[in-house]
Amino acid sequence: MKGQDEGQEGKEGKDPSGPVLTRLIYLRASPAVLERRLRARRGHFFDPGLLASQLETLQEPTEEEPTDALVVDADGELEAVIGAVAAALGLPTSGGPSAGEDR
């Protein structure tokens, strides 16, 4: 019978030598920016008219919970947001996707 780490390694292809760390990254954007981005989307299922009610029920991370949440200002351009996340995580900031690139 395989150990738990071996089973996970084989299943997911992860290196079993260390724990897999997960970090919550909360992209905080103003309602106006979110609405503008929603209206710019074509063929998306989400009705921008529902945004206000969604934001009313949104539970943003606080300093108490979750304690390790990374809150990033997402009002800026994509490259700036990516750069802020990468810098906060200690990752290199060059060579990332560009705003015009398909994902």
Image (cartoon, helix red, strand yellow):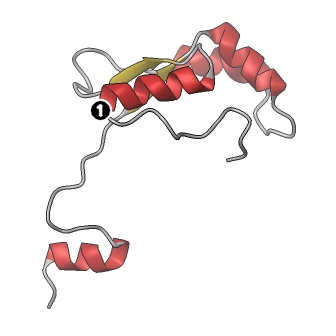
Q: Is residue 68 above or below residue 30?
A: below
Question: Is residue 60 in sight in this rendering?
Answer: no
Which of the 4 image quarters holds residue 3? bottom left
Residue in view at x 17 percent, y 56 percent:
19
Answer with left or right where residue 96 lies relative to residue 48: left
Q: Position of residue 10 (x, y in %)?
A: 30, 80
Q: Position of residue 64 (x, y in %)?
A: 22, 17
Check disc 1: other Cα within 10 Å, few if <14, some if 14-19, many if 20+.
Answer: few
Which of the 4 image quarters holds residue 87? top left
Which quadrant does the N terminus fall into?
bottom left
> Under tag 1, what secondary structure?
loop
Question: Is residue 62 in sight in this rendering?
Answer: yes
Q: What is the total number of numbered labels drawn onto the structure image? A: 1
Answer with left or right where residue 30 lies relative to residue 84: right
Which of the 4 image quarters holds residue 26? top left
Q: Position of residue 37 (x, y in %)?
A: 73, 22
Residue in view at x 38 percent, y 36 percent:
92
Residue in view at x 82 percent, y 22 percent:
39
Residue projecting furthest to the right? 42
Residue in view at x 29 percent, y 68 percent:
14
Residue picked out by circle 1: 90
Answer with left or right where residue 3 lies relative to residue 33: left
Q: Is residue 28 above or below residue 89?
A: above
Instruction: Name the foreground residue: 28 vs 79.
Output: 79
Q: Position of residue 94 (x, y in %)?
A: 48, 35
Residue type, mark 1 in image: Gly
Residue projecting furthest to the bottom? 1
